[in-house]
Amino acid sequence: MSVETLIAMLASTTAAATPLIFAALGELVTERAGVLNLGVEGTMLVGAIAGFAVGLTTGSLTLGYLAAALAGVLMALIFAVLTLQLQTNQVATGLALTLFGVGLSAFLGKSFAGQPIAGLPHLSIPLLSDIPVLGPLLFRFDILVYASIALYVAVQWFLSRTRGGLLLRAVGESPAVAHAIGHPVQRVRYAAVLFGGACSGIAGAYLSTALTPMWVEGLSAGRGWIALALVVFATWKPLRVLAGAYLFGGVTVLQLYAQGFGLHVPSEFLSMLPYAATVVVLVLICRDRQTILLNQPASLGKPFHPEL
Amino acid sequence: MLRLERRPLPSARMRLLAPLIAALLMFVTGFAVFALLGKDPLAACAVFFVKPLTSLYGLGELLVKTAPLLLCAIGLAIGFRANVWNIGAEGQLTIGALAGTGVALAFGDTESHWILPAMLIAGVLGGMAWAAIPALLRTRFRTSEILTSLMLVYIAQMLLAYLVHGPWRDPDGFNFPQSRMFNDWELLPILVDGTRINLGIVFALLLAGLSWLFTDKTHAGYRLQVAGLAPAAAAYAGFSEKRNVWLALLISGATAGLAGIGEVAGPIGQLQTTVSPGYGFAAIIVAFVGRLNAFGIVLAALLMSLLYLGGEQAQIDLGLPSAITGLFQGLLLFYLLAMDAFVNYRLRRVVRAPAASGAAA
């Protein structure tokens, strides 16, 4: 394998990992507040079509990403009102959000299918991007790749170093105690869910405007679910989300290059890899019951309403 | 100001009314959506919800699409009652179709009355085998069946794609990714001339009845119910959680597998790259809208089937994308979940914020 191939593979791995980082970090914050939102896949799809449609019609991808984040927030708002206000079952409501998002995005996207869009441009940082090997590996990505790293730093810092992060974790561990001390449990949970929605929306837009710059029905192909699995795999820790996302990005890219390495396996079997890997990884992590119990937010998925 | 307040007892009336109100709200939203799209809403609603039912063929199609939805939903409902979240019925359906087709292809053009039953059994076993994977992983490693069953949907669809593009492709099929057409003796018999109604709907209704007997009249069904409503009580009573998980997943896998072979040996007549327009996922909605109750699920499956037909009709007559079906399906479930809240809670108008509330809760 030549150095060029290796560099190209690592670069595609980074691109494939970026939407997973956004979606999984958003869901991680939501879950750390004690709310399980299974609607990531549907929210990503709605974000994908919103970002694509607005980006294409206005010609500005910045507006596209804003629209995607807003669409994600709106989707999350439906979920928040139902689960936090009306106390509906979080699993059922999350599934509903995904089914709704699949339908809505397919409906809205019909007229955009097959249209070309100018994808997110790659930055070319002067001087730095010309360094051999390191240049293409570190300094020639699109802006969202750097944003995903910045998001990781921000989430990590917020959760472990700020008062707000401490409050969010307290709400996730024991909403009743947090409420009794006088903290606004509902407001914190709303904020966490909406933040998760915005991240999923952006993740979706990255799929339709950067990774494969076009709209195809159901283009997320289970990435929202993989992001959910990543949060479990990461045992609710941001750094491990980052590592997991790159691992999965690598698996996705490997299938593209496998044929080139002379591995003659039907392409369908290679396409199974990310999904099979998700199952294997989940099994490996869940086998260790202690780790899960220690790290899982104690009130995850359990309804709580301060006035009821 | 409106405030949510817990009812002293869950409202039985609301429990029955919630699905009806949800369906009504969905119709109203549909009306608004059609108006927004610049269609005459009344005429559009007529096209969507009424026109498919105005011919014998249309009524037949309603039952043809009801069969797989009903089959998947009754299986899923049994699991949902016990908090076992199999959301991979679509994958189990696909594997059911594969397994049944495998039997048909293995026999070649040999004519026998036994081939169709063998195909059906293979379909059931295929669905069960696929559902056994999340059951094993949940009981052995405590892996969430939600994520594993869903991942297996994608894997099943890749397997299907491989088979119809590769080893099972019809050699005389001009390279289309599909198996050979099934022979007459490999197809479910048509029950009513002039329609495509086949034996599938009979199986579905029969199994719906059996599922009612199972959930309401057997001890195993009771154990599942207790596990769902009061897991701690179930554990105290010594009901095995593992047995419940296995039972729920195997049953739902079996019915989804039957739905899958019923599709390829029924309306489709061969194995293609797509064997279902998302019946396995829509069945999740059917199970909830039907209140996880066999009779309710039959009605909900009919409504869901109408949504599919309406989407197709709207595409033909109004030029709307048939994906509008998915939009309505999602809305229906949202409205149902929202209405469900009012089974246990009610809205109270409060003039002033009451002091020291919550004592009754």
Image (cartoon, rainbow, N blue to C red):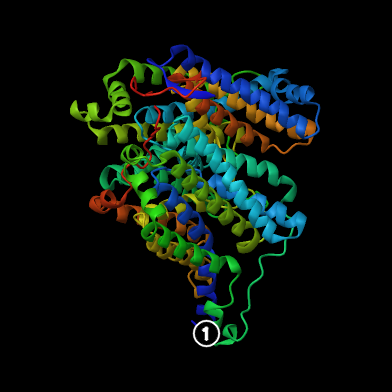
Q: Residue at x 55, y 76 (%)?
A: A8
Image quarter for residue A147? bottom right
Q: Position of residue A167 (x, y in %)?
A: 37, 49
Q: Is residue B178 visible?
A: no
Circle 1 Cα neighbour tier, 10 Å, few/some/many (<14 / 14–19 / ≥20): few
Image quarter for residue B316? top right
Q: Is residue B84 above or below residue A46?
A: above
Q: What residue did someone put label 1 on? A: A133
From the viewer's perspective, is A19 left or right of B127?
right
Q: Residue at x 49, y 62 (%)?
A: A151
Extreme-top residue of the structure = B13
Give the quadrant of the C terminus of chain A. top left
Q: Position of residue A81 (x, y in %)?
A: 52, 35
Q: Nearer the viewer, residue B168 or A133?
A: A133
From the viewer's perspective, is A105 left or right of B78?
right
Q: Is residue A68 visible?
A: yes
Q: Position of residue B277 (x, y in %)?
A: 59, 38
Q: Is residue A175 above or below residue B12?
A: below
From the viewer's perspective, is A287 left or right of A103?
left
Q: Nearer the viewer, residue A40 or A28?
A: A28
- The kind of residue on which mark 1 rests is Val
Q: Position of residue B108 (x, y in %)?
A: 52, 42
